[in-house]
Image (cartoon, rainbow, N blue to C red):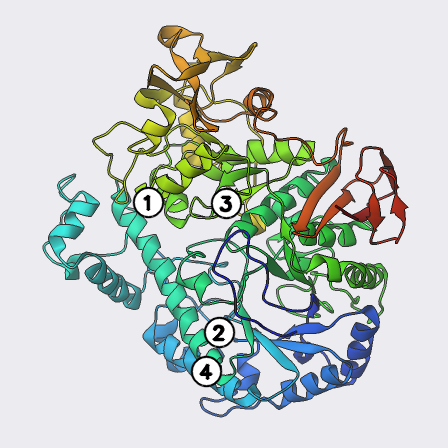
């Protein structure tokens, strides 16, 4: 598992490792030491090559301040190493020991209502606390110094799922750090007052010492600029907390790889310092925790969505925690993968960019807040179907990894994503309308169902590999992106801009030029003269990473739905559509083709969807939000012209297809996400690496069956 220098962050980045990491998070401290040898032997027999240790064991490593004892993990690592199992160690800073929180109570997290957290859970320490950061550096250095020459320790995970339990903080330390951040950012109080619109509602400050973090329990709403800067600060502070640890680990042994495992994507700017510090990113994947559409196969589409979102932040990644079975904490539980489904979900992760995967967890806990969260081995120490599926997946990886490593995931259709400022800007002023991600889900799910290569990309990335880019109402459009976007279009790409794009600047101010703003207005040949709400269309619930709601059923959305009473329609192609959430009236240039016109109320006859030819490509503007029906019409109007076609023709329902490719090879993943048998007849000729069989374009897949076809 040799580490090489990482490439710059990009959706097209491959991992800087020479082997596929496969294994499980392991907690030797949870069981009697007599189990350890048997555990290591079973792991090796299953084909595992790595475990992850130590993320919640600070109290064992330092039972008293300054008294370090790593002997338990020394013995565990040696037992594993003797069986060829390498160790990824974790900095244990998600769970400070009781002596620390008792001696230094100022490290405890404070919520918006001033309530101080107590010991007895996790992530109850405030990472903004200078005292906590000091102790975080202490334990990290002690671990790094102790294991710097241990040949079995190959890499490190920083902390554990930072900001998953809570990302916000309202402690005195946070207030002080926030003021320092603002002083560095703005330098003068006048500059801050301008950015936050201090002349509105008399919200101006006389000096930085008066500034507080925004709180939602005020009678009115805080300035969007203040809220945006608070979350920018939280992301900055999270990166600084991690940076402390990364510096220590790099100095101790530069050959170690370092990553972090993300759960919820809250208040972390992956493309900033946080991601740049790491060799690659890790994302914890729990498909059946995302939504409740188990019986309709909806969790497969949602898993694909989340994997594609993750890949946009830094290219290929690893999965430090992949669901293996039923999962639960006292407040929730997941559905249970059926036989074959655990393996199929793991291969879905690989198909969409994972170059390492660890099943959570090796064995379940017998006590604590996750006693019903199942592992590879059952509570009675018996390996059953999950162990067999894990071993089968390891054999799959052994068959494909030589062809797999060094490949990237193909994208023909790309959705603008992975931009911290835009995802936060929406939250500062949602108005009850869908977020950019909620809007984009319509396009992603259409492509997933049709077998079209789709994913997420940042406008700064290399766009030459994609054919179509959809921008889902990014309200903060930055001028520095214009040159890359225009070059993409002139070189033959198709750009689709969604409503409300470019309506704010970096401070959440409305610009004095009409949306979509300088650069995009000229490229598309349109300017938005007016916009308004329309009646709310029906929508199913969509859930976010690790169970967090995207917001379709939030109180603000329900309020907006009750107040929006006017519907608007438009015609695109030969089909009439109901506008979603919002209409825009467009002023268009003479060389702009009108693809769709409003067909109701006072907007009748005005342009709703436009296209302007630019070089060898085209720029399309849509004056409303997406619906499933609109995506279908847009695909009919645009996809064939843009050279976009399914990876597999006549794709049966509930079959997922993805291509990973390099210059000299292509791998087509064909995964049956349902229980029934499916027959495919339009596949490329090649060899199925999983079975070793030559295929002539036809294949039958049984219950959750999988194939990986190498073709040219």
Mark whose residue sits in front, 4 or 1: 1
Mark 3 burial class by Cα count in 10 Å: few <14, some 14-19, many 20+ = many
Q: Residue 391: horizontal and vertical position, in percent?
A: 82, 64
Q: Seen in the image, is 467 located left or right of residue 532?
A: right
Label whose residue precedes the other's in the sequence (2 or 1) = 2
Residue 156 screen position, x and y as percent? 56, 74
Q: Nearer the viewer, mark 1 or mark 3?
A: 1
Label 4, on which residue?
A: 251
Quickly name the residue at label 2: 93
**Is residue 664 shown above or below 380?**
above
Kindly identify which numbered label has been placed on residue 480.
1
Q: CA distance from mark 2 to mark 3?
A: 32 Å
Of pointers 4 and 3, the one earlier in the residue sequence: 4
- Which of the two residues, 213 or 513, is positioned nearer the viewer here? 513
At a point 74% along the width and 56% down the height, the residue shown is 325
Q: Position of residue 593 (x, y in %)?
A: 43, 15
Q: Earlier in the sequence, mark 4 or mark 2?
A: 2
Rendering coords of residue 436 (x, y %): 45, 37
Does 658 sit left or right of 461 as displayed? right
Mark 3 element type: strand
């Amino acid at each position: 598992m040799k580490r090489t220098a990482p490439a710059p962050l990009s959706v097209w980045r491959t991992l800087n490792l020479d082997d596929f990491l496969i294994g499980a998070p392991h907690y030797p401290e949870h069981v009697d030491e007599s189990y350890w040898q048997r555990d290591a032997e079973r792991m090796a027999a299953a084909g595992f090559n790595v475990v992850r240790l130590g993320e919640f064991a600070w109290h064992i490593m330092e039972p008293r301040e300054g008294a370090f004892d790593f002997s338990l993990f020394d013995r565990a690592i040696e037992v594993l190493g003797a069986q060829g199992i390498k160790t990824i160690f974790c900095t244990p800073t998600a769970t400070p020991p009781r002596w620390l929180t008792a001696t230094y109570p100022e490290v405890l997290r404070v919520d918006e209502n001033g309530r101080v957290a107590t010991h007895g859970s996790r992530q109850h320490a405030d990472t903004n606390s200078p005292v906590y950061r000091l102790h975080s550096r202490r334990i990290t250095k002690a671990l790094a110094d102790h294991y710097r020459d241990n040949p079995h320790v190959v890499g490190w995970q920083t902390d554990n799922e930072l900001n998953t339990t809570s990302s916000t903080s309202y402690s005195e330390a946070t207030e002080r750090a926030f003021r320092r951040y603002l002083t560095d950012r703005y330098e003068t109080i006048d500059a801050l007052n301008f950015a936050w619109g201090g002349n509105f509602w008399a919200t101006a400050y006389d000096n930085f010492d008066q500034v507080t973090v925004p709180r939602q329990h005020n009678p009115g709403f805080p300035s969007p600029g203040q809220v945006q800067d608070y979350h920018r600060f939280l992301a900055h502070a999270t990166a600084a907390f991690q940076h402390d640890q990364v510096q220590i680990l790099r100095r101790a042994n530069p050959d170690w790889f370092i990553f972090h495992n993300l759960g919820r994507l809250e208040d972390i700017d992956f493309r900033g310092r946080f991601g740049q510090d790491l060799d690659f990113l890790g994302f914890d994947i729990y498909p059946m925790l995302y939504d409740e559409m188990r019986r309709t196969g909806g969790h497969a589409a949602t898993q694909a969505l989340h994997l594609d979102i993750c890949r946009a932040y830094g290219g290929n990644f690893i999965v430090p925690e992949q669901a293996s079975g039923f999962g639960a904490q006292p407040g929730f539980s997941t559905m249970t993968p059926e036989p074959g489904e655990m393996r199929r979900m793991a291969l879905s992760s690989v198909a969409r960019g994972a170059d390492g995967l660890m099943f959570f967890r090796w064995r379940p806990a017998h006590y604590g807040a996750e006693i019903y969260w199942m592992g590879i081995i059952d509570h009675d120490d018996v390996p059953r179907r999950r162990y067999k599926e894990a071993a089968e997946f390891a054999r799959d990886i052994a068959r494909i990894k030589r062809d797999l490593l060094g490949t990237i995931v193909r994208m023909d259709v790309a959705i603008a994503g992975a931009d911290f400022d835009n995802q936060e800007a929406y939250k500062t002023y949602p108005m009850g309308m869908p977020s950019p991600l909620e809007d984009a889900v319509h396009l992603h799910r259409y492509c997933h169902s049709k077998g079209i290569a789709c994913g997420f990309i940042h406008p700064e990335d290399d766009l030459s590999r994609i054919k179509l880019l959809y921008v889902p109402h990014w309200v903060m459009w930055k001028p520095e992106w214009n040159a890359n976007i225009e070059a993409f279009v002139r070189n033959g790409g198709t750009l689709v801009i969604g409503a409300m794009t470019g309506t704010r600047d970096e401070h959440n101010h409305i610009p004095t030029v009409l949306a979509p703003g300088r650069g995009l207005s000229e490229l598309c040949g349109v300017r938005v003269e007016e916009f308004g709400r329309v009646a709310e269309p029906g929508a199913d619930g969509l859930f976010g990473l690790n169970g967090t709601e995207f917001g379709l059923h939030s109180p603000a959305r329900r309020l907006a739905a009750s107040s929006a009473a006017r519907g608007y329609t438009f015609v695109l192609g030969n089909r009439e559509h109901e506008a979603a959430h919002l209409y825009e009236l467009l002023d268009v240039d003479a060389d702009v083709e009108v693809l769709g016109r409003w067909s109701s109320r006072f907007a009748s006859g005005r342009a709703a969807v436009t296209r302007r030819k630019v070089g060898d490509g085209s720029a399309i503007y849509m004056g409303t939000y997406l619906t499933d029906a609109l995506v279908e019409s847009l695909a009919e109007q645009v996809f064939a012209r843009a050279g976009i076609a399914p990876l597999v023709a006549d794709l049966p329902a509930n079959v997922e297809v993805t291509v990973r490719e390099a210059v000299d090879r292509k791998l087509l993943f064909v995964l049956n996400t349902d229980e029934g048998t499916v027959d495919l007849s339009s596949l490329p000729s090649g060899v199925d690496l999983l079975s070793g069989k030559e295929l002539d374009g036809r294949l039958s897949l049984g219950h959750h069956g999988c194939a990986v076809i190498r073709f040219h």
